[in-house]
Image: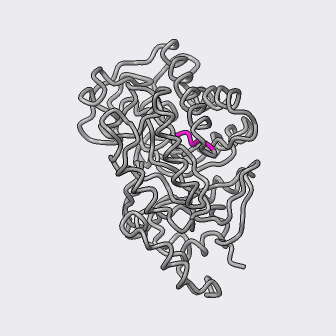
Amino acid sequence: MARLLTSLKIGNLELKNRLVMPPMATSRAGLHGEITTPLLQYYDEKTRDGYFGMVITEHSFVSADGKISFHQISSADNSMISGLRQLSDVIHNNGCPVILQLNHAGSGTKEEFIGSQPIAPSVVINPSKSNLELPCELKCDDIKRIISDFTSAALRGKQAGFDGVEIHSCHGYLLNQFLSPLTNKRNDKYGGNIKGRILIHIEVLRAIRNVVGNNFPILFRLGATDNMDGGLSLDDCITVAKELEKESADMLDISGGMCRYTVPDLEKAGYFIKQAKAVKDAVSIPVIVTGGIRTLEQAESLLKNNVSDLIGIGRPVFNDSNWVKQAMNNIDFETDTHSMSSPMSLRQNQLTAD
């Protein structure tokens, strides 16, 4: 049997296959983050026929000062639970497990979106995007509040019927800012070497686990490398992965750090296949890789080469809601994948991603 079609159990959650619909921003939520009819229609259309083993929603903001833009989904207060329940119901009715992604933008946002100066680990302009503003530095009490915000948002996700949550720590957002030496210049326990820079991740994970219990999957979307001078190294990323596994994370979803979801010279290199493989070799929990994977044959090849345990395919699905159905009906899983391009030489193309 093709590996793509094999099941995978994560705690009490069983995935029917290894194909993931990854988080992709739609800007279809209401002005304050409420779930709207167009947003529900989008997810209904993309997941119809139930071909995905798992769906991860676009990122939701856990507090008002962590919003990245207008019309982003909110998980920031209890008034959002009923709408989030509608979202999980739509996807479940199509036969797919669904994970709620939780995020805080930190210095990745602007005052026009949050009404105040952005916050960050240190007073450093975020290098992940151009024209970002100088943030103010978080105090320890602020960090405690943010940990509480992530925890409350995760509990809302469980109450709204989601099968798990994914904590966003990549693409230059707040937790990624703590992880990266480019944006974390702190001299307290949350800074310094990788053990300090990962501390907020550990505290978020422990706090969420305490309220959701052991049978509710907690995923981390991890910015594996920054691809910038002085940025996060792959060795540090592997240390992070091992620590998150030790602290009960159920799955790691590998993407980019300050480089977001791109890498230099896309003509010659894959997205984050190298990083995903290195993380998979270092941990025993499942690993997801997403980015520029445009055919199910490529996905199958990555699985057979033990690059990851699950494959996210975004852009083709974003562009064509019938893509998965057509691809599943047409693929020949008996294709000799050794005759295909190796995983590291698969040409990648830029994805719209959270």
Q: Residue at x 71, y 51 (%)?
A: 13
Asked which quadrant contains residue 3, the reply is: bottom right
Comparing 277 with 19, the one in front is 19
- Residue 189 lies, with reference to residue 337, above or below; the image says above
Q: From the viewer's perspective, is 297 left or right of 136?
A: right
Screen quadrant of the N terminus: bottom right
Residue 218, given in percent of the width and then of the height, sits at: 64, 41
Coloration mode: one colour
Q: Residue at x 47, y 13 (%)?
A: 139
Q: Is residue 95 magenta?
A: no
Range of residues picked out in magenta = 164-168
Q: From the viewer's perspective, is 123 left or right of 257?
A: left
Residue 79, given in percent of the width and then of the height, sits at: 46, 28
- Residue 347 lies, with reference to residue 210, above or below; the image says below
Residue 348 seen: yes
Q: Main secondary structure of the magenta part?
A: strand
Q: From the viewer's perspective, is 206 left or right of 297?
A: right
Asked which quadrant contains residue 215, the reply is: top right
Q: Is residue 167 magenta?
A: yes
Comparing 52 with 86, the one in front is 86
Residue 162, given in percent of the width and then of the height, sits at: 59, 44
Residue 236 seen: no
Residue 179, given in percent of the width and then of the height, sits at: 52, 34
- Residue 183 lies, with reference to residue 91, above or below; the image says above
Q: Residue at x 62, y 37 (%)?
A: 158
Q: Residue at x 65, y 26 (%)?
A: 207
Comparing 82 with 12, the one in front is 82
Q: How many marks?
A: 0
